[in-house]
Image (tube, grey):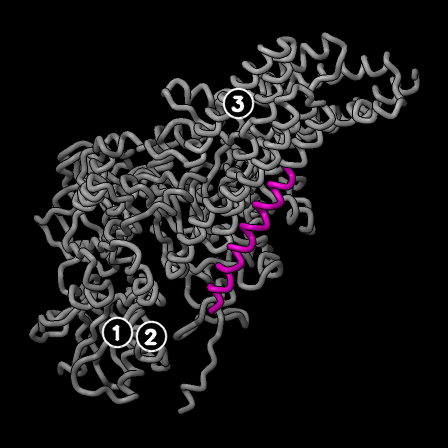
Amino acid sequence: MSDTMQTQVACFHCGEECHNNPVMMAEKIFCCEGCKLVYEILHQNNLCEYYDLNAQPGVNQRMQVRRDKFAFLEDEKVQQHLIQFKDEEQVHVTFYLPQIHCSSCLWLLENLHKLNHGVQRVTVNFSKKEARIIYGIKTTSLRAVAEVLTSIGYEPYISLNDMKEKKPKVQRKLVYQLGVAGFCFGNIMLLSFPEYFSGSGHTDVAMNRMFQYMNLALSLPVFFYSAQAFYKSAWGGLKHGFLNIDVPIVLAIVVTFIRSLTEVAAGNSGYFDSMTGIVFFMLIGRILQEKTYQGLSFDRDYTSYFPIAVSVIKEGTPVPTTLPDIHTNDTLLIHHQELIPADGIISRGEALIDYSFVTGEAAPVKKSVGEIVYAGGRQMGGNIEVLTIKEVAQSYLTSLWNRDELQKKNDSSTSFVHLLSQYFTWVVLLIAVVTAAVWAVNDPARIWPSVTAILIIACPCALLLASSFTNGHILRILSRHKLYLRNAQSIENLANTTHIVFDKTGTLTGKSGTEVRYFGSTLSPIQEMMISSLAAHSTHPLSNAINNYCGNSSSYTVREFKESEGNGISGWIENQYIRMGSAEFVGIQPKENHDGSIVYVGINEKPVGLFTVRNGYRPGIRSMLENIRNYYNLSVLSGDNTREAASLRILMGNSATLHFEQKPADKLDYIIQLQQHGEKVLMIGDGLNDAGALRQSDIGISVAESTNNFTPASDGIIEAQQLKMLPAFIRLCKANKHIVIISFIMSLAYNITGLYFAVQGILSPLVAAILMPASSISIILLTYSMSEIYGKRLSDKNHV
Amino acid sequence: MGVIILLLGASLTVALGFLAAFIWSVKHGQFEDDFSPAHRILFEEKNTNNND
């Protein structure tokens, strides 16, 4: 057939395939009216350079945005929260535009003034996906700016989270401290060179003296400013009665500084070079370890999902109202594609609610007047009115965040590095005491130099360096494989996991990997094409799945296409009247014993058969589970009913625990229960309903279809197709510990060499100056190469 | 020896200059977004000058 030869055409605007009746304009092909509309706007305003910078730079516009969506931006109160600066002339506002992805976006947004003359200046921060917009207060409005952005495909994402006061500022102090330490360290090294070679007789006593004072002066900013990060952490540890690794390090820094002061006073050179060097290296390690992923957020709670305002019907007219101002017994007007912000009862309209946000289940649920709808659902049909029965903060989903278990973040987990450093500290103190005792008997004058030298040389900075550099590398290697962990502690928690809990829908099963089956009288190829043509007219996920199943070979024109929200679609093709949708809609008896969502098909008033659509398991999940069930206890918590229990049992193995019909609170309680049995729980989930469990677990990882998607608060974010790599990731995290220990043993060799000199009280600044940087650099190199080797294994596995 | 002190002063001043430059650049967010400035400079027309 000639139709199957048809090549796929990519939309000129967004680059997606134009399945059926593409929209043509000026020899350009678009997949939908929305994309064409954006092109028209840009074309009229001479902004087509947008398409020259990158091919098909747009974002698909099939989902139309409601016209009055941004009416709430006219509300004074909402404006107050969004606007950063305002005077009589201009307003500064920053919008989060998640669609930003290429240089075309950058160019177009910064030329926004050509589309709205009131806009004075737009500055895009690409990595944060934010646009800072300055506009004239007399010439345009906040709403108009948001609408012009929406019209070109960059709809601002405004959520309840924007109502919160003050976002945390970027922490730059550590970087300044590093800069200062680097400056001082470099110059002290330079000034110390004459001292290192003073043995060979090329010295000038007066000049050396001056160098010593300059070194002292240069060490002051390091001691009082750069090292603050360590003082703070050590003090914090001591206050909680816990000897963390920073305590002996601070001890060493302080002792080195005081010893150096006395040395300079006595006319000798101090150990300023070693002290500043070690602070410098440790700061690098700390920064490497605390590197954050811009554009990824690990702290999202429900406020990031909820809109900032909804329409409340007051005396018959909808008024935009901010969420905290919604009270019980208010009537909310929820439009197509809007989120229901509070629990309520439907008072008008037919609801078709997509709870995928909450449960991960893609198929929408039908609700009629009088039924309760929960906050977090997205209305998919026409407009509905909801009478609120609870305020936003008290709603079923949101109240989960107020539970006591989640308020206090469990900080009981401490790194093995801290424990190791404790033993180390005691051993060092013991050596110091013994040395002091020995010299007290033999030569009391040497107590002070030898004891201080021991404390200097035995500072566990090598251990800290080893752990922070290894952690930093491992985090980077993991992020290369699309697993983004929140911090270094997460590596260790992942390595210590004993029990893995999975969510089912959206985690084990994909949102995109749908499995379609057909039951009924056999369809002829022509009928398949007709069904496909009809389904292609609808944007409903089920229609998409069926269209794919029927080969995407839509070539027929559909006349009188009708879409009845929540029921089905119908249309005429070549004298055939085709209907697809619910049993009611097609006019046949519903059949119960099928999995997943069911779509019935009728041709010319005659029932033909039915499609079942359900989410398939993600590729690679099966073998991954077969692998890990030998090493870990597994559980599955599913919000669904038990219809897939049998297939899940085969997948998970006999020893796994399966729980169905789990509410968010049940999931949280299950995690607590496991933890009470001493299990270290790794929770992997994706929806808001897993959010409580993700927070409570020892390490919670949320699955994202793409990193642009929103994920609930967690310790890590993994891209969905990488979930199959989980066992390898855990192995890498375990290797992390080995690398630290090996590096530590190597650093011990340096320490023992140093101690050999120190106990005799003959540690010269030269020996210290060589030992310190040498041990630091070799440890950095060692951890780097070892983590790369382990990381390499990961990549090899990835390609198999 | 005098010349060494002079050189020392000069080198420290230069180094301080670099330190100040570094702190200034961090403060002004030059390390925050490594994409926009690099691409912005390649666009044909200046978009800041023609606010009609």
Q: Give the amino acid at mark 3.
A: Ile
Seen at 47% across and 64% down, the residue is A797
Mark 3 lies on residue = A431
Residue at the extreme bottom of the image, as rendered: A1
Main structural element of the magenta stretch: helix, strand or loop?
helix
Seen at 32% across and 39% down, the residue is A301
Foreground of the two, A68 or A468:
A468
Q: Give the amino acid at mark 1.
A: Val
Residues behind callouts 3 and 2 on a single chain: yes
Query: Which chain hosts label 2?
Result: A
Question: Magenta residues, as a range?
Answer: A776-800
Reply above or below: A30 against A437: below
Q: Residues within 10 Å of mark 1 (few under 14, many from 20)?
A: many
Q: Is residue A792 magenta?
A: yes
Query: Would you say the residues marked 1 and 2 are in contact, meaning their CB atoms lie under 8 Å apart?
Result: yes
Callout 1 secondary element = strand
Would residue A301 be visible to someone looking at this image? Answer: yes
Q: Nearer the viewer, mark 3 or mark 2?
A: 3
Query: Would you say the residues marked 1 and 3 are in contact, meaning their CB atoms lie under 8 Å apart?
Result: no
**Between disc 1 and disc 2, whose residue precedes?**
1
Mark 1 lies on residue = A516
Quadrant of the snapshot with the N terminus of chain A = bottom left
Mark 2 lies on residue = A548
Q: Quadrant of residue A254?
A: top right
**Between disc 1 and disc 3, whose residue precedes?**
3
Q: Nearer the viewer, mark 1 or mark 3?
A: 3
Q: Give the amino acid at mark 2.
A: Asn
Residues behind callouts 1 and 3 on a single chain: yes
Q: Is residue B38 magenta?
A: no
Foreground of the two, A553 or A431:
A431
